[in-house]
Image: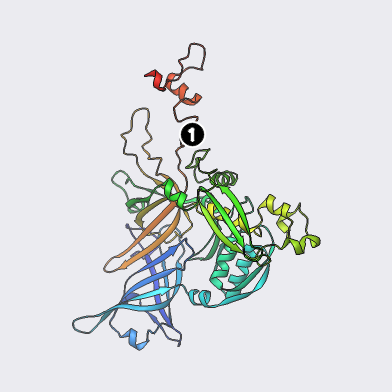
Amino acid sequence: MSKDNQYRRQDDVQISSIKIYSDAGGVQEIKKMVLGFSIYESLDGSFMTATIDVVDNIGLATKLPIIGQESVEIIYRTPGFGYRYTTVKFDVMKVGKRTKSKQGSSEYYQLSCISPNYIDFTTSRIDRSFRGTASSSIKNLLLENGSKLGNIDGSKYRSVWVIPSFTLHESLKYFTSRCRGYLSNMSDFILFESSYGWNCRSVTGLFAGRSKITYRLEPPELPFRSIEEFPIIKEFQVRSYYNRYTEMEKGNHACRIVTFDWTKKTENHSMLGSDDIYLERRKTSSNLEEYRNLPANNRYDQKFDARLFVRHQSSGLHEINETALEGNISTNEDDPLESIYTTRTVLDKYNHPNDFKTHLLSRQLSSKGFNPIRVWISVSGNSGLNVGDVVTLQIPSPEIPSKKKQDNTDKSISGRYVITNLRQEVKMMSNHQFTSFIELGRDTSPMAVPDENTFLGTDKHTVENMFGGGGGANSPTPLDLSIGAW
């Protein structure tokens, strides 16, 4: 392990301390007793977790004792990159895998830990109304609970929100589903916890961020230093690639929502195609890739029965009761960002979160922006990474470079990804080893998908590349691929 701020060897790590605190007031440094630990972060809204392997030769489990009312604090970092120490805290939930040595002088066990917010978030209940934007309500709830704040992206549209006895975690997820970004009409916000706090981020906003690091599959030419080994991928696997049937089943491309109002005994039908979402995303500052993974004209967007969602509703609970409010509209339709109660013309024009029938359908499509392509990599430990960060992959192509084509990059896999799952694993045997296991996701490819104008190679650009010339009278015509030509 490094003693200073220099990266000396692959998988280098500095561990400042590992302490366990008892609610009774006791504290014990257990760094020398720990064989290793793993910290897990996920972008799916779940809590951070950790496992700690301990060899106990002082009877800590019975003297402290460990009964599920303890906290663990780990302080560590990757040296040599200017990273500050990362401090993570967990509550002990279980002592498992207990095994005594043959001599009985020591005992091995594994501490299963979870985020200190877990108990409060899943037991505290919210039963009141809120006024303002959804993102401001999320921030206020986190501050009231004393939770650590990460990045909370601002959302537009003020409204009155009624929470009918939800847990704190359910309330946060409810508000997240009602967020709409300032720069676009996207409702692709997600809630997740990382080592620097709770975050409510737009998927489009995540992809728009700068890349934190570039990982390469090919090692540099020998000789190279340990600092140059840092961005080399040790293991690489494509977990899932784009599958049209799977994405149709998820309702990502074309779907219909049917809502049934059990008070009025009426049905409402809404339809939204994936092309609307992709067009909206192109208007934002997201620079994930240049192309989409669907042709411009998606054949499934107009199929009304491609996917069906049925929801129940109750007028006046989470939806505007227009009959009661129509004569008391107190806002200006030209200023929808500050609208509390709005008329139907505003709802239809701006897709306000209060119009939940179309809002939830839009969210179903737009919040899946990091699902279709998943890649798993194993790299040297990097304490500066968190879920939601953007990284770049450089994967070589299996083709042999030619004189005309020197670029040996596999464009279908290489590019920018967002971290969807992260496991930080530190082994503390004779030599400390730090490995990051990362799952990456994205929704597009840097390769253009052939559309009806380019599929047969008949567009102007392809013709010029094949035959040259500027399309004059003597220029050859495109190949005739019809049956008669054969």
Which residue appears farthest toward the left when viewing the image? Answer: 102
Seen from the viewer's position, the closer of residues 349 and 44 is: 349
Q: Position of residue 149 (x, y in %)?
A: 56, 67
Q: Position of residue 211 (x, y in %)?
A: 48, 50
Which residue appears farthest toward the front when viewing the image? Answer: 265
Q: Quadrant of residue 127?
A: bottom right
Please name the colour scheme applied to the rendered image. Answer: rainbow
Residue at the spot 67% in from the left edge and 69% down from the top edge: 130
Query: Can residue 430 be seen at all in this image of the molecule?
Result: yes
Residue at the spot 36% in from the left edge and 59% down from the top edge: 437
Residue at the spot 69% in from the left edge and 50% down from the top edge: 349
Relative side of 143 to 96, left or right: right
Q: Three-letter amino acid code at disc 1?
A: Asp
Seen from the viewer's position, the closer of residues 284 and 361 is: 361
Q: Position of residue 13 (x, y in %)?
A: 36, 63
Residue underneath mark 1: 451
Query: Can residue 372 be seen at all in this image of the molecule?
Result: no
Q: Is residue 482 above or below residue 112?
A: above
Seen from the viewer's position, the closer of residues 336 and 220 is: 336
Q: Quadrant of residue 30?
A: bottom left
